[in-house]
Amino acid sequence: MADSERPARDWQEVADRLADWIAEHVNAAGLRGTIVGLSGGVDSAVAAALCRRAVGDDALGVMMPCHSAPEDFTDAEIVARKLDMATIAVDLSGAFDALHAALDSAATGRGEAISDGHERLAAANIKPRLRMITLYHYANQAGRLVIGTGNRAELTLASSTKYGDGGADLLPLAAPCSSGRSGRSAARRDCPMQ
């Protein structure tokens, strides 16, 4: 049966199971709630909706633009507002620029090149790693679990940045009970997209 053909009660059941799974892990860890990065994309909106369902007001969204398109930030704000989710906004552009410059300076200061042509990939992977540092900073300060936004396809294909977007305490959109796209689709029904 295609995802679009599933009865609404099936979607509700999957979303409830995912939210219960998140809540159980938060309680088992003795923590206060969850924290999730809000990018303005569908997966982060779905993960945020699951967090709100799981822990209510103890879900915190963090918007972390880093040389990002302004509409992404606007979309993240819309999701947070529609979910009535508390948020923090941290512009990581300056941290990215400083770290990237320091890394380049150290590499060129050796007197020999250490690159083999993968500079763009190396620079691009700094952003998700900065986001994870930021999420864990606030999670540790406030006693929260970091909820990742990666889905099962990204996990299966290893298409997320190691120790970046894939680094989270829980990945509900990749959870076994989500049955692939179904978990994301289930929560999307409650997801406040434009």
Image: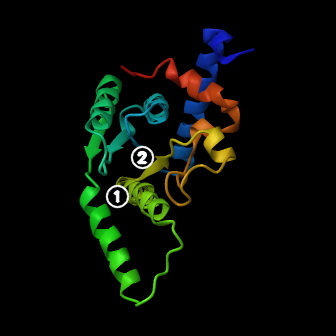
**Which corner quadrant holds the C terminus?**
top left
The x, y position of residue 175, in whole percent, is 65, 39
Of residues 144 and 103, the one nearer the viewer is: 103
- Residue with the mark numbered 1: 141
Q: Which residue appears at 56% of the width and 46% of the height?
A: 170
Of residues 19 and 186, the one nearer the viewer is: 186
The x, y position of residue 69, in whole percent, is 30, 40
Of residues 45 and 139, the one nearer the viewer is: 45
The tag on residue 32 is: 2
Q: Nearer the N terminus, badge 1 or badge 2?
A: 2
The x, y position of residue 145, in whole percent, is 47, 49
Element carrying mark 1 = helix
Which amino acid lies under the numbered mark 1 shown in the image of this protein? Answer: Gln
The tag on residue 125 is: none
Relative to 57, does residue 127 appear above or below in the rendering? below
Disc 1 residue crowd, few under 14, some 14–19, many 20+, Cα 10 Å:
few
The x, y position of residue 57, in whole percent, is 35, 33
Q: Which residue appears at 61% of the width and 28% of the height?
A: 183
**Which corner quadrant holds the N terminus?**
top right
The quarter of the displayed image where residue 104 is located: bottom left
Disc 2 residue crowd, few under 14, some 14–19, many 20+, Cα 10 Å:
some
Along the horizontal axis of the image, is 2 left or right of 15?
right
